Amino acid sequence: MIFAPLVAAAVAAFIPSERLLRWWSLIATLAIAVGSVALYTGFDLTTHAFQFVEFAPWIAAFRINYALGIDGISLLLILLTTFIMPLCVLASWKYITTRVKEFMICLLVMESAMIGVFSALDFVLFFVFWEAMLIPMTLMIGVWGGPRKVYAAVKFFIYTMAGSVFLLVAIVALYLWDPANQTFSIPELMGRPYSQSFQAWIFAAFFISFAIKVPMFPFHTWLPAAHVEAPTAGSVILASVLLKMGTYGFVRFCLPITPLGAAYHAPFVMWLSVAAILYGGFAALAQSDLKKLVAYSSVSHMGFATLGIFSLTTAGLQGATLVMINHGVTTGALFICVGIIYERLHTRDLGESAGLGKFAPVLAGMVGLFCLSSMAFPGTNSFIGEFLVLSGGFTVSTLMMCIAVPGVVAAAAYNLRMLQKFAYGSTKNPDHSGVPDLSAREIFALAPLVIFVLWIGLQPGPFVDVMKVSVDHLVQTTQAAIAQAAAVAAQ
């Protein structure tokens, strides 16, 4: 699955026809998505151990290995990645008209890097995949983006590279910690008896790197620019997958490797998460650009994910994982819808699209469902995730959760405002009488996301079951390390 997209990209380089390129990319990504189902069907739900493990020596002198494996958390994120990629190809079918070959190659290379990040069990390998994502994503923004594409691409590149420096420093520090047993193996580095001060510094380095990627408030300023200027597929990949790499880093590294650092900084991170929920919600409420509105809503939604992670509770962490998946589904769908609107009207202004729902009822119905999901309406996918996050958060701080409530209200306000304007408008709507409704290709791109919105919302059991054992083990080991440190301090 990691190298199949690279092979597909190599083949794409020799395909002369743009039409054939689009079909080849769609078939390749669909084949990988179908193949990834084997991970789900062959996954053992009864163990927290890494599964489908692959191991081969790479750079023996430094004990750097090609090591792969997944648990219940990374499995869900890999499935999200593989199922989103064919939809990105469909969303780019008519949107991308120049340098189609290079664009499709960027998409396929991105898929390899993203799957690699979620399955790497060696820190050097993880860092290689982590950095490999940066180049095609920067190119997608800088080459196929909007009027300020160079500014957005440079800002995205600088922010991500700055975060990567802190990540690299933390990796090297962990490697050098025990001179007698130096390793980059992620499972081996988990549970080592690091001192509390060492964990605090390592956590701080991890935090800066992953907070930029999420992005958490106040590290979020690259996100609106990148989303607004990126092509539709770039925005979908950013929202659905790239932002999850930050929260995945918190779950995979911060909690099991630096549990004391995580516990010490948890109140600070949770307050930042509440600030992100409030800021993102009210900033989205003030936007008239549809892409900016959805981009700021991402800041708010990812605040729920980090809030759940650092509640250090089972409910909170389960909810955070569901929020990651749900945000990928819902926000990715909304960006596809915005791209469809832009293809028809050549504007993303909410006022200019007012009343379009009268002439495009199928599109309006899709936007309505995804807006309900974005506001966590009961019966949609986002409700169960945010409910679990708030359940875990209330066990930590009732005051904090009460302060976060206006952010939930703001989500309802900006989503209903967008839906009302788009579907009904006012007495002076622009003339949209000649605008066509969704085509079969566009319905095919959105239909899987509609299914997941309703499936997770009405029957979340299969998704919770996949991650349950992994989440339980992670919370238990983290809490045990914290309790042991407290007992030692008490003596």
Image (tube, helix red, strand yellow):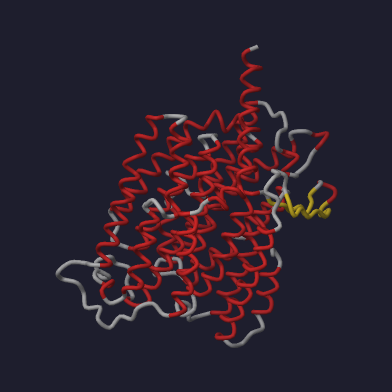
Residue that protrudes farthest toward the bottom in the picture: 17
Q: Which residue is drawn at 39% across and 55% down?
A: 374
For the C terminus, the quadrant is: top right
The percent coordinates of residue 280 (x first, y second) are 37, 48
The percent coordinates of residue 266 (x first, y second) are 51, 32
The percent coordinates of residue 323 (x first, y second) are 49, 49
For the N terminus, the quadrant is: bottom right
Q: Can residue 10 be seen in this view?
A: yes
Question: Residue 182 is drawn in which quadrant?
Answer: top right
Asked if residue 179 is positioned above or below residue 52 in the image, the reply reads above
Question: Residue 433 is drawn in which quadrant?
Answer: bottom left
Q: Which residue is drawn at 40% across and 66% down?
A: 148
Q: Which residue is drawn at 49% across and 61% down?
A: 452
The percent coordinates of residue 80 (x first, y second) are 56, 59
Could you say which is closer to the camera, residue 360 or residue 464? Answer: 464
Q: Can residue 219 be seen in this view?
A: no
Residue that protrudes farthest toward the top in the picture: 491
Could you say which is closer to the camera, residue 390 or residue 97? Answer: 390
Could you say which is closer to the camera, residue 72 or residue 116? Answer: 72
Residue that protrudes farthest toward the left in the picture: 427
Residue 196 is left or right of residue 53, and the answer is left
What is the count of numbered marks? 0
